[in-house]
Amino acid sequence: MTALAIEHDTPLRAAAAVARPLTGNEAIARGAWEAGVRVAAAYPGTPSTEILESLATYPREDVHAQWSPNEKVALDVAIGASYCGVRALTAAKHVGLNVAADALMSHAYIGAHGGLVLAICDDPGIHSSQTEQDTRYYARLATVPVLEPADAQEALDYTRLAFDLSERFDTPVIVRSTTRLSHTRTVVRLGERHAPPPRGFTEDPNRNVIMPAMARRRRPFILAREQRLAEYFDGATVTRVEPGDAAIGVITVGTAYAYVKEVLPGASVLKLASSYPLARETIRAFCAAHERVFVVEELEPMIETEVRAMGLAVAGKEFFPRAGELSAEIVRDGFVAAGVLAPRPPAPTFDLEPLVRPPVLCAGCPHIGSYFPLRSGEARVTGDIGCYTLAALQPLAAMDTCVSMGSSIGNAVGMALSGAERKPVVATIGDSTFLHGGIPALMDAVYNQASITVLLLDNRTVAMTGGQDHPGTGRTLRGDATHKVDYEALCRAVGVNWIRRVDSYDLAAGRQTLREAMEYDGVAVVISDRPCVLDPVKIKGPPLTVDAAACTACQSCMNLGCPAITWSEETLEGRHKVQIDPAQCIGCAMCLQVCPTDGIGAGMNA
Amino acid sequence: MNEAAHAIDPAAVAAAPRPTNVLVVGVGGQGVIMVSKVLARLAQRHDLEIKQSEVHGMAKRGGSVFSHVRFGPQVWAPTIPVGEADVLVALEWAEGLRWLPYVDPERGTFIADTKRIVPPFGCTDRRRGATLAYPGTAVADVVGLVPHAYALDAEGMASELGNPRVANTLLLGVLSTVLDFGVGEWREVLAEFVPAGTVETNLAAIETGRAWALDVAARGVLPLAAAPARAPAVDVPTGAVRLDIEAAWCKGCDICVKFCPELCLRLNAERVVELTDPAACTGCRICEWLCPDLALAVRNVASPAEAPA
Ligand SMILES: Cc1ncc(C[n+]2csc(CCOP(=O)(O)OP(=O)(O)O)c2C)c(N)n1
Ligand code: SF4
Ligand code: SF4
């Protein structure tokens, strides 16, 4: 094996390095660029989205950065580049790795010809995700190392290191971030780009083609690799003991490190770079040197369980919760409960009315029009993931289920074929979600002759994650024009014969078309067609107004859930009339269609 | 070992240097992130360590937005612990109230715009006499709860300067009297961040905010005139309602069923209208007014007992 540049061989940066404030995600992108990444592919997902958006700001000659229709395709693209001996990156949110897991499992056997790094962002606290899960389980499952930076500087440094480790140990490497790290901005010292020359494709079917015989042969290599990595982490400078009081020792990793430093200044800390494979000998020595040892890690007790299995006595999840995001307060409370810190005087509490302010669909959001006809409850409506999931909440309350990206159509097939659902079944799915995981399910519906309606919400963007492009928008990540998916042709090709397109803002047409679709025996597709009002361009038309004299306070318009419509001060028989906020209203005129008294119009009482 | 003897000396914990903590809160689209970026830039000019943390995601869609800004010689945690914010800057009144427990009870300062952004969820009660679900807490109620409070109609004051959009800069002007950066620095950093055409107004706004805060501090009293009033109580008639249906007059045209905002009417097997859920009927009278055959009528009843079960 050729000697490769590794962390302690090459200084990461010149002494007088340039410093710039970067978020964790921007730092990961910078680290990948400095490491000479050639190909980067991802599907958006909070909190990982900005990694690729940021990489796309580096020169085209340096890096090909792209959106893929889903996380598995993105990882496969990165693997393809790695086969050709160039450095490649994929980024995803934690649940994105569920989708890409199959390719990861195989690639752990195949190994990395060109360095392959997966930047995976967990979402402790479930700020905007469907689940709270710990990516470090995937590292163990796939037997691949996971690096866990504690701040943006480490996010940059560890990403660089990850590429080196990937090539040196012939393995994909996971860099695990969290929402907090990804979205915290700190000043980061930058380095230069050092792109290793491409190694080219190496024809070696015994390595490149996974089959039972090859996998059996590689299995011992993988276990030996795990051991070699553990030894590497034992000797590496990224595994750091910060000595302090011998009575208390804390083993920690990632963002948890910052909370420990905040609440236990001066404590003895073993800061790991990786929770898998573990720097076992360092841990053993650390435990021997301290009377009481705690493990503080966010989410699952990965380190703790393994350290206990080594026969060492440590405390952990009995004091620090498994569920939710850690914070300085929570870590402090844990150490207070453990008798390490003195309790603090309780913080003052205030007896104030709380205000509920959940996220809502935007004023004039086309999803409002798509779901309004489904409010009546005539249909069983399966839902999916995107801005439109908010249609499950009051006042639209027009969605019965939501499982995972692309599930709506498969769920609808199961409902329709269950023999236990008497209402017509309507699957509702966003354009990006459809391209992500909906197409095979649509094929399934036709193939197995389920009678369902599919309402495809074509708002021409991945709105939920901030308005990214996808294969249905006709633009790439770098903004270049490209082929645009033709949904009608696609649906026809898998065997759908009943396809209609409606304007999302035309409520009567939407209702009528959905009725016809539900009566159709077979798979019917209704494409609800209007761009998102926020991305890629902010849409703002002249606002409508309410004629207070005509408004009877029935609040029918408020059933749309448009945030521009709220109560006015005026009442009729004790019920509030409504008003439209001209700053928010975009003039979509959906409320005007719903008003039974012609009380809404352009400049009615202005 | 002796559990009661704390392993870490409380004095050492107390003596650890603490960074300056500023929490900026508001509603999606108000510019919370911009305000926190200005602060971070100021701290960067002093070679301080900075952590600026926010959670994106749902923020865009009208939800609460917050940004933790911490700076000092050394900053560990990215978020400010409860009760340790030196300053809480609220761009919206109810959001300020939400985060009040973060204000340091010994030395913290609360700076809030009294602007109220009422969410649609504040207007969901359809019954007669319903009131807005927005905190009735007034400025006077808050003054005693935190060591220092500044509450001002920043948007109104900004409008007087000719641009309501500089309200945030006005709040920065107030903030500039609390933090240790020089006035000139605030002006320079601000000029980097705001659109070229608005530099003059923004600089005027920072001056106005500063002057207002210095005046308040000098006089030692907060003008309470800017306080948001409680939502006016709604009058007449707050009693219960009852929907009377003259079944014999209904010809099953379905108009009322389609228009009922509460979806509480349906046609029964005989194609005659019936009320599915009396509790859902708000007495809005849409059915009464639309029925071509006058088959439905909303009656005011004195007590819920008179309403149908
Ligand atoms: C497996 C997985 N990948 C990514 C995400 C992040 N995510 C949530 S919704 C969404 C796409 C929404 O796009 P679209 O279906 O077009 O609906 P829109 O938000 O535009 O209404 C994405 C990428 C996720 N939740 N799960
Ligand atoms: S961002 Fe677009 S899709 Fe999402 S709620 Fe707003 S208008 Fe609708
Ligand atoms: S026209 Fe009506 S529904 Fe559309 S944005 Fe304006 S207030 Fe909302």
Image (cartoon, coloured by chain):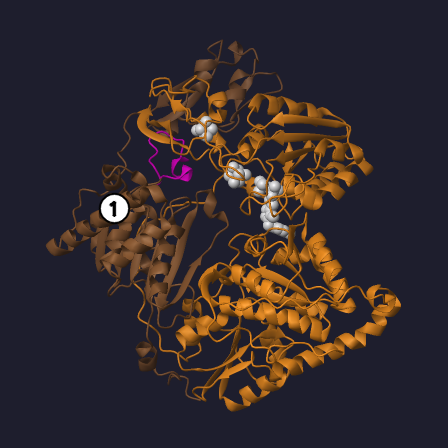
Chain colours: A orange, B brown
The percent position of residue A513, horizontal first and vertical second, equals 65, 23
Region rendered in magenta? B118-139
Left or right of residue A112: residue B68? left
- In which image quadrant can residue A473 be found? top right
- Amino acid identity at mark 1: Ala
- In which image quadrant can residue A97 be found? bottom right
Q: Residue at x 70, y 35 (%)?
A: A421
Q: Residue at x 46, y 27 (%)?
A: A587
Which of the image's four quarters has the C terminus of chain B? top left
For this orientation, the residue located farthest to the left is: B219
Q: Which residue is mark 1?
A: B205
Q: Residue at x 33, y 55 (%)?
A: B189
Please determine whether, in this image, residue A119 is positioned above or below residue A357: below
Please determine whether, in this image, residue A42 is positioned above or below residue A500: below
Report how many numbered discs are placed on residues in the image.
1
- Residue B203 within the segment the image draws in magenta: no
The percent position of residue B1, horizontal first and vertical second, equals 44, 89
Q: Residues within 10 Å of mark 1 (few under 14, many from 20)?
A: many
For this orientation, the residue located farthest to the right is: A213
Residue A150 visible within the image: no
- Residue B119 within the segment the image draws in magenta: yes
